[in-house]
Image (tube, rainbow, N blue to C red):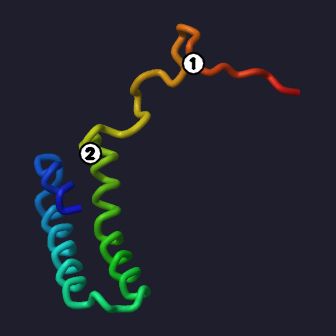
Amino acid sequence: MKSTMDTVKDKIDAPDKAKVLFKCNEVISWLDVNQLAEKEKFVDKQKELEAICNPIVTKLYQSGGAPGGFPDAGGAESNPSDGTGPTTEEVD
């Protein structure tokens, strides 16, 4: 997430970027001192991070600002007309 924020730094709002970076640093600090924690604690921390990051990343993809664009959003044809692609047969 931290490297993604660097990659999209010009396409994301400063408050959103700061929020993600703050939470990433918080979770990394927690991981540094809790390496022997129970699995459930790690899962909880992951969910906390996802709760902050997922809406921001979703907004980034919806605005078309994500690296590589949004998959299958008006890109190349999935079945080229030159006959080299898969075909569909009707089945009763």
Nearer to us: label 1 or label 2: 1
Name the residue located 13 percent from the left edge and 67 percent from the top edge: 18
Q: Quadrant of the C terminus?
A: top right
Which numbered circle lies on residue 85? Answer: 1
Q: Is residue 13 left or right of residue 53?
A: left
Q: How many marks?
A: 2
State the image coordinates of residue 31 (x, y, percent, origin top left).
24, 83
Which quadrant of the figure contains the N terminus? bottom left
Could you say which is closer to the camera, residue 74 or residue 90?
A: 90
Residue under circle 2?
A: 66
Nearest the viewer among 50 and 27 is 27
Whichever of callouts 1 and 2 sits on the residue coming sooner in the sequence is 2
User: Looking at the picture, does residue 1 appear above or below residue 27?
Assistant: above
Circles 1, 2 touching at the beta carbon (< 8 Å):
no
Answer few, some or many: residues within 10 Å of disc 1's Cα (few below 14, many 20 plus, some between 14 and 19): few
Please tell me whether residue 73 is drawn above or below residue 14 in the rendered image: above
In percent of width and height, residue 79 lies at 54, 20
What amino acid type should be assigned to the residue bearing mark 1? Gly
